[in-house]
DNA sequence: AAAAAAT
């Protein structure tokens, strides 16, 4: 297992290529039926393919629709009564193979013991088997009815879509934190999305929802607030194409809003968007928006620098939507613009921030990211999406399975580009951007413009205009910084003291395990804290994040997953229990506080052996402070609002109760447990126990504790 | 070195 890592890397690469190859040869076989035209079948071809199921296939008619290469197959799906016409389902038996797959992965270890070359094959063997057996059959029928695949080479194996199975409960799990703001404190403002609900609700594809949907309904009243965003999103997803005019005046305020003196109007943003923004009291563009919007509107490539929260989302969102709305129509499977973001959280935030705007201007958007069910993403793509907001992994996945074709992308946007340009990420980005036709517009936004993104700029941007506002250090300047040199034995207590304060605190640690550990230690000391890291499954991540945003949990212990993506207002203190890796990370982490002009404090702990590194780091980050000695109870800690915690230990159970959706899961087991695999490493066992216990024994200890912690200023 | 991103 020594060089497992490097092997993995190699493996992944190989596998991708290999997979493509498999797929391609697959397609070739299918294509044989199309007289082997290499340019592939055009409209006529598909038309003439005339499979029986073809004619029957209609929007909303799930029977003959099909999908291919569906990754997560759950047994209940196969039971789905609706598949009547779906005889070929059986073929999938070969694919059901959760077990196969697992076997495949296990094999990996053996392999690593044996040798590298053969490995690869074994590594994904599960997958390969699958594609060899089941998948092909699926796909065969799948060629029906994709009409205008006039685009370049890719169109070949577009799956025929998949049937709209909507029983994916976990489906929108992801969106709990929706209420989260985009740029400003728009939480309230976009919250009034409720307005839209009634009108869209009727448009939902009730016809497609089986009985499962009904059962969902039963859960609903019980977890209303968690449902809302989900429902909202669902409503939007499922808006039938023909009902598109439904984007009507409900979006417009009753009282006319004056556009006079509105900064966005002055920048050339269309009235409908300006009005929508004004409804949320967004009338004055941020500097980065003023700087970049005109150029972006003019169609130029833009290189924008500004830290997260400086308004980047609107800076690229407004011109993109404007230009998209100006002409053209999304074709099935071919988005017209793509926003690439490094984390799922960020993807959701971008999506949420743009959602009302997308609607008002009559376009469609979709969030495409891992950890969320494929189905809504596939069907949205099939229906046609103007703006795709994506994390790289899932997008590539969708591209490889033919669900997303970037050959008609007019605008490509890279958010947090410095992060995306890091090792390992870059490859994915290039793979994606290579599919985007040259000559389109490219917008690249980043907090810093020097971390190796030159390659990307060079390769994908044409004569870009560079706009740098808010150069990172300026925001740093608005915070109080403290670097505390402490003894190892004091670390735990000092951490708790700093975190034990009124208001929200984000604690950064280096590793996932560390996040769980520190959060646990804080709770042991009576400080209510939850951990957030990439090892949690998506629903856990979302639950933790929304609990933090809602103030149910005041302390978030996170890895760097939260260093960039998280937009939460009112984070008064950022505590770095482990020093950041470099000054960039310092800036990113620090940027979680002092948002939107608030004040903020950054406390960084360093152990004696880290002193010199720490000082250098501070200097590099542009922070003008000295590392100072500190011990528990020191004034510095009190100055930051901390105090010695006195609360009783908080059990995992109590925490779980707090971060769980209210009485969620009687019928909703799938909500959190489904993804199974990635629980807390250390507290995983307690997780479930606590969860259930919480439901039964409803002793409301957690809240008291929060209050105690909160008032213990 | 860690984390993130697909399963």
Image (spheres, helix red, strand yellow):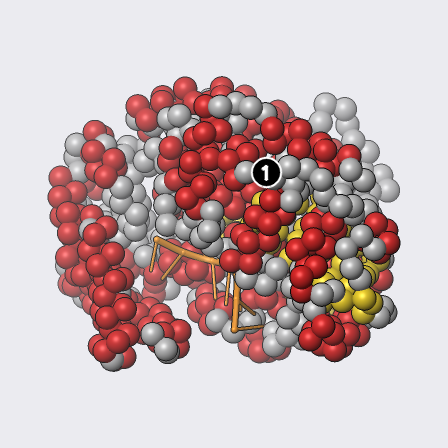
Left or right, A230 with reference to A94 = right
Residue A232 location (% of width, % of height): 52, 31
Left or right, A448 with reference to A248 = right
Of A265 and A652, which appears nearest the observer?
A652
Q: Dividing the image into 4 quarters, which one contains the C terminus of chain A?
A: top right
Q: Dividing the image into 4 quarters, which one contains the N terminus of chain A?
A: bottom left
Residue A63 location (% of width, % of height): 23, 34
Q: Which residue is mark 1?
A: A650
Left or right, A58 with reference to A505 = left
Residue depicted at 86% across the width and 51% down the height? A639
Examine the rendered structure and indicate whether residue A607 appears above or below residue A542. Answer: below
Residue depicted at 69% across the width and 53% down the height? A493
Dividing the picture into quarters, in which one does residue A270 lie?
A: top right
Indicate the secondary structure of the residue bearing disc 1. Answer: loop
Residue A450 location (% of width, % of height): 67, 75
Find the residue positioned furthest to the front: A489
Q: How many marks?
A: 1
User: Callout 1: 10 Å neighbours few (<14), some, many (20+)?
Assistant: many
Left or right, A251 with reference to A55 = right
Of A71 and A619, which appears nearest the observer?
A619
Of A601 and A32, which appears nearest the observer?
A601
> Can you see residue A236?
no
- The chain letter under disc 1 is A
Dividing the picture into quarters, in which one does residue A585 lie?
A: bottom right
Of A688 and A372, which appears nearest the observer?
A688
Residue A448 location (% of width, % of height): 69, 69
> Can you see residue A554?
yes
Residue depicted at 45% across the width and 29% down the height? A693
Residue depicted at 70% across the width and 59% down the height? A490
């Amino acid at each position: 297992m020594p060089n497992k890592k490097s092997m993995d890397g190699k493996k992944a690469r190989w596998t991708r290529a290999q997979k493509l190859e498999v797929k391609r040869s697959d397609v070739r076989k299918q294509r044989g039926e199309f007289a082997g035209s290499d340019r592939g079948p055009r409209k006529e071809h598909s038309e003439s393919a005339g499979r029986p199921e073809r004619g029957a296939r209609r929007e909303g008619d799930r029977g003959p629709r099909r999908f291919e290469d569906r990754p997560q197959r759950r047994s209940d799906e196969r039971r789905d009564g609706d598949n009547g016409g779906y005889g070929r389902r059986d073929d999938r038996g070969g694919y059901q193979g959760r077990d196969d797959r697992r076997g495949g992965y296990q094999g990996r270890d053996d392999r690593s013991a044996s040798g590298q070359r053969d490995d690869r094959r074994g590594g994904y063997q599960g997958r390969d088997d699958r594609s060899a057996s089941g998948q092909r059959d699926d796909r065969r029928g799948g060629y029906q009815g994709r009409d205008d695949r006039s685009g370049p080479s890719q169109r070949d194996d577009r799956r025929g879509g998949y049937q709209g199975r909507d029983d994916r409960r976990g489906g929108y799990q992801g969106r709990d934190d929706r209420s989260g703001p985009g740029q400003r404190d728009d939480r309230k403002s976009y919250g009034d999305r409720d307005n839209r609900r009634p009108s869209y609700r009727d448009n939902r594809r009730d016809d497609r929802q089986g009985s499962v949907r009904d059962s969902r309904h039963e859960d609903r009243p019980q977890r209303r607030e968690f449902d809302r965003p989900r429902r909202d999103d669902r409503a939007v997803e499922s808006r039938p194409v023909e009902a598109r005019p439904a984007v009507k005046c409900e979006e417009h305020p009753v009282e006319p809003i004056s556009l006079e003196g509105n900064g966005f109007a002055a920048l050339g943003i269309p009235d409908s968007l300006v009005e929508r923004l004004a409804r949320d009291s967004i009338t004055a563009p941020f500097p980065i928006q003023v700087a970049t919007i005109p150029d972006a509107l003019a169609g130029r490539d833009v290189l924008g620098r500004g830290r997260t929260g400086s308004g980047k989302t609107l800076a690229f969102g407004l011109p993109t939507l404007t230009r998209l709305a100006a002409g053209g129509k999304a074709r099935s499977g071919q988005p017209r613009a793509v926003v690439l973001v490094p984390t799922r959280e960020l993807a959701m935030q971008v999506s949420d921030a743009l959602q009302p705007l997308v609607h008002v201007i009559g376009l469609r958007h979709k969030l495409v990211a891992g950890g969320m069910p494929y189905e809504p993403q596939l069907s949205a793509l099939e229906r046609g999406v103007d703006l795709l907001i994506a994390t790289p992994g899932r997008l590539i996945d969708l591209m490889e399975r033919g669900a997303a074709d970037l050959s008609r992308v007019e605008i490509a946007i890279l958010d947090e580009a410095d992060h995306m340009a890091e090792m390992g990420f870059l490859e994915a980005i290039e793979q994606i951007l290579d599919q985007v036709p040259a000559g389109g517009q490219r917008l690249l936004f980043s907090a810093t413009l020097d971390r190796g993104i030159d390659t990307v700029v060079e390769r994908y941007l044409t004569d870009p205009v560079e706009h740098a506002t808010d150069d990172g250090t300026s925001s740093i300047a608005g915070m109080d910084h403290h670097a505390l040199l402490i003894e190892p034995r004091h670390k735990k207590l000092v951490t708790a003291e700093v975190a034990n304060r009124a208001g929200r605190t984000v604690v950064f640690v280096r590793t996932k395990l560390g996040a769980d550990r520190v959060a646990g230690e804080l709770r042991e000391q009576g400080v209510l804290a939850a951990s957030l890291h990439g090892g949690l499954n998506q629903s856990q991540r979302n639950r933790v994040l929304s609990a933090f945003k809602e103030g149910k949990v005041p302390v978030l212990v996170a890895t760097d997953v939260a260093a960039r993506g998280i937009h939460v207002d009112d984070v008064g203190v950022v505590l770095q229990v482990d020093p950041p890796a470099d000054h960039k990370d310092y800036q990113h982490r620090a940027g979680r506080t002092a948002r939107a002009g608030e004040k903020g404090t950054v406390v960084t702990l360093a152990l004696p052996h880290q002193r010199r590194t720490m000082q250098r780091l501070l200097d590099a980050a542009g922070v003008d402070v000295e590392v100072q000695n500190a011990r528990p109870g020191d004034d510095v800690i009190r100055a930051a609002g901390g105090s010695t915690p006195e609360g009783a230990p908080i059990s995992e159970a109590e925490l779980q109760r707090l971060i769980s959706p209210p009485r969620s899961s009687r019928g909703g087991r799938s909500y959190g447990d489904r993804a199974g695999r990635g629980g807390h490493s250390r507290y995983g066992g307690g997780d479930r126990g606590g969860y259930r216990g919480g439901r039964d024994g409803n002793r409301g200890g957690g809240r008291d504790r929060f209050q105690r912690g909160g008032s213990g200023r």
